[in-house]
Amino acid sequence: MKSEFDICIIGAGMAGATIAAYLAPKGIKIALIDQCFKEKMRIVGELLQPGAVQSFEQMGLGSLLDDFDAQPVEGYSLLQGEEKITIPYPENFKGMGLHNGRFLQRIRASALQNESVTQIHGKALQLLENEQDEIIGVSYRESLSSEIKAIYAPLTITSDGFFSNFREHLSNNEKTVTSYFIGLILKNCEMPFPKHGHVFLSGPTPFICYPISSFEVRLLIDFPGGQLPRKVALQAHLDANVTPYIPECMRSSYEQALREDGFKVMPNHYMAAKPIIRKGAVMLGDALNMRHPLTGGGLTAVFSDIQILSTHLLAMPNFNNADLIHEKIEAYYRDRQYANANLNILANALYGVMSNDLLKTAVFKYLKCGGANAQESIAILAGLNKNHYSLIKQFFSVALFGAYDTVRESIMNIPKAIKILSDAFTIIKPLAKNELW
Ligand SMILES: Cc1cc2nc3c(=O)[nH]c(=O)nc-3n(C[C@H](O)[C@H](O)[C@H](O)COP(=O)(O)OP(=O)(O)OC[C@H]3O[C@@H](n4cnc5c(N)ncnc54)[C@H](O)[C@@H]3O)c2cc1C
């Protein structure tokens, strides 16, 4: 089927809009379809780790981070009881805190200003296939007319986010909900450490915060379990497990936010990437792969995937050879697995650690020692260190440190030490199996 497009992108979210903004100036003809191009208020994708900022800048899109009050983030702080530690990001690297909706509108505008991009308002319905089972485009319901139409392209990118409609054709993934995040915006809030991401460990489950504008702080509070909590359960959780641990300097903004603006709740998914490689289509973003947002690693993975996929696609002379496109898709899936394994494992392993009292204390004390271990750990969190050996080494160093520390307190703690080691192993084993093999 002859097509006027090289690529049809389903979903102009963070993944779809960014790859369009990157590829369009290179002359690639793109159909960009989304059911809603308006700015949304979401609680997702508001902290860009340095790895995400680096990829975004390497794609030549860095200026889109300017002029909308996005805030530089210089490192992380951990708070447990009265104790506080800060760990700077590696030198010369910074993260960014921002309003996701505003950022996305800027990326979309950058993509849509190119003549080679055609904006399509509509809901994608079904992937279209030819007689050889190759994907040749997508049908959609046009927003304005409600007519069912079709777009044809040699490559369809499905980047329709975490509730993707197209997974069943393109992947074997099983998604699970690990927990929920309750999101609040605290206005005129003073954080214990300005320009830092914060992880609060004093309560039974973690909560995190970071700046998203010069006067707003995003607070994300974990609610464990796989079932959408009722409002009363959320309120009880806040009252018992969060409010008592909010630092004094943040308390009045926190209370005001609860009183005036309320909160939003989002599920936190885990889903390893298990693509079914089919001719003519490729998955990108949350449609393909998700991890717990505790570490803010989602956009680091998304932007890194865009770089990898684009590098392969741009190595082709054109989009006329379906076999060559297929080779490039295979290469992308292979390369992205290596690039993202650390982000995926760390996010869910750290969530497991933060929900385990013994390991939580171990990690806090371990990082408090500072030095090379803290630096290597923060570089993994930042998405800058992709070496799998570093991650496994740091993870088991924490467990061994915790076990040793508890036995040092008393020889009677040997069973506790064994529990630390076995819990650590239980947390990391399924993640490493999913992500590294
Ligand atoms: C609570 C929470 C907090 C998070 N915080 C962070 C963070 O701080 N830092 C970070 O890096 N990551 C974070 N993440 C992860 C990050 O937000 C995601 O990885 C990222 O937004 C994924 O982008 P995407 O383009 O795949 O999906 P989305 O951004 O969700 O975009 C999907 C797009 O597809 C469109 N669409 C869907 N279905 C159709 C259809 N049928 N037809 C047409 N269009 C369609 C939607 O309208 C949307 O525009 C967080 C995730 C959660 C759940």
Image (cartoon, helix red, strand yellow):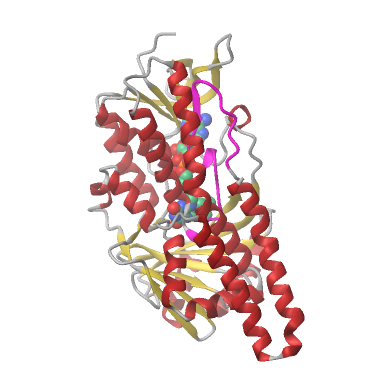
The one of 428 and 400 positioned closer to us in this rendering = 400
**Is residue 261 placed above or below 58 in the rendered structure?**
below
Q: Position of residue 32 (x, y in %)?
A: 38, 28
- Quarter of the image where the N terminus is located: top left
State the predominant SS element of the stretch in magenta.
loop
Residue at image location 57% in from the left, 39% down from the top: 163
The one of 359 and 136 positioned closer to us in this rendering = 359
Instruction: Find out whether residue 286 is within the magenta segment.
Output: yes
**Is residue 98 placed above or below 39 in the rendered structure?**
below
Q: Position of residue 278 (x, y in %)?
A: 56, 24
Instruction: Find out whether residue 77 is within the magenta segment.
Output: no
The one of 242 and 357 positioned closer to us in this rendering = 357
Give left or right: position of 70 versus 183.
left
Q: Quadrant of residue 413?
A: bottom right
**Is residue 9 placed above or below 184 in the rendered structure?**
above
- Residue 203, visible in the rendered structure: no
- Residue 92, visible in the rendered structure: yes
Q: Quadrant of residue 203?
A: bottom right
Give left or right: position of 392 versus 98.
right
Magenta segment: 273-295
Residue at image location 38% in from the left, 69% down from the top: 75
Q: Position of residue 247 (x, y in %)?
A: 47, 80
